[in-house]
Image (cartoon, rainbow, N blue to C red):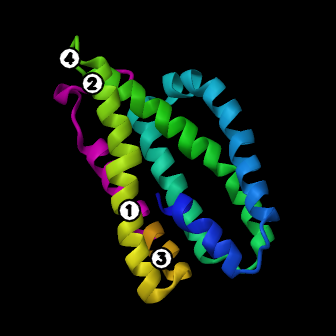
Amino acid sequence: GIVGSFLFLFLKELGDAGVIMGMCLMFNCMTEVPVMYYCDAIVKRLGLIKCIIFCLFLKGIRLAYYAFLFEPNWVLPIEAVHGVVFGLFWTAGVEYVRKITPEGLSATMQAFYGSWIHGVAAGSGALGAGWVAEVYGLRAMFAVSAAWTLGVAFLCTVVELCRRPSEGRDEED
C-alpha cells in the first residue's frame, strides 16, 4: 500500500509532470508478465518460503532506493523490481495458502489471503506510512518503511534458519 499510495506523490514532489509516473506503470507491467510466466519454475527451485523472504528483501531495497532518490527519472531502473516483488510474492503466497488450507476451505482461504494482503496489510501500511509522511516527509517515510521491511525480512530469515525439519518443513518449503 505504501508504494501505490505515495510513490507518485513523491515523484511529483521531485518535479515529475506525470510522464515518469506512466512509465513506472509500464515498467511494472512489463516485468510482471515474464516473472509470473516463470514463477512455477522459480518456486520449485527455491521453495515457497525462500521466495517470500527474497521478495521481502527486494521490497525493502526498493523502498530504500526511493529514500535516496533525488531525480524522478532514476526511479525507472528500480521499477523493474516490481515484477519480481509482486509476481513472485503473490504466486508463492497463493501456493503456500493452498498447501496449508484444509480441504473444502480453499476458496475461503484464498479470499482471506487476498483480503489480508490488499486490504488489511496495504491499508494499515498506508495509514502508518501516511502518518510518518505527514510528520517527517515522504523521503523519511520511504526510509522508515525500508527499515521496517528489511527488519521483517531478516526476522523471517532467522525463523526459517532456526526451523527444524521435524517442524513441518518439507522439500518445497
Q: Secondary structure at mark 4?
A: loop
Q: Is residue 47 left or right of residue 18?
A: left
Residue 12 x %, y %: 70, 75
Q: Secondary structure at mark 2?
A: helix
Q: Is residue 169 left or right of residue 67?
A: left
Q: Quadrant of the C terminus?
A: top left
In front of the other: label 3 or label 2? 2
Q: Amino acid at mark 1?
A: Gly
Q: Which mark is residue 108?
A: 2
Q: Amino acid at mark 3?
A: Met
Any magenta on residue 162?
yes
Residue 141 x %, y %: 47, 76
Q: Which residues are magenta?
A: 147-173
Q: Which mark is residue 102?
A: 4
In front of the other: label 2 or label 4? 2
Mark before the other along the chain sequence, 4 or 3 = 4
**Residue at mark 3 to residue at mark 1: CA–CA distance:** 11 Å
Q: Amino acid at mark 2?
A: Thr
Mark before the other along the chain sequence, 1 or 4 = 4
**Residue at mark 1 to residue at mark 2: CA–CA distance:** 24 Å
**Residue at mark 4 to residue at mark 3: CA–CA distance:** 39 Å
Residue for badge 3:
141
Neighbourhood count class around disc 1 (C-alpha, 10 Å): few under 14, some 14–19, many 20 upward: some
Residue for badge 1:
125
Find residue 152 and report its image quarter. bottom left
Q: Is residue 116 left or right of residue 105?
A: right
Mark before the other along the chain sequence, 3 or 1 = 1
Q: Amino acid at mark 4?
A: Pro
Q: Residue at x 69, y 32 (%)?
A: 33
Label pair 1/2, CB-CB below 8 angstroms = no
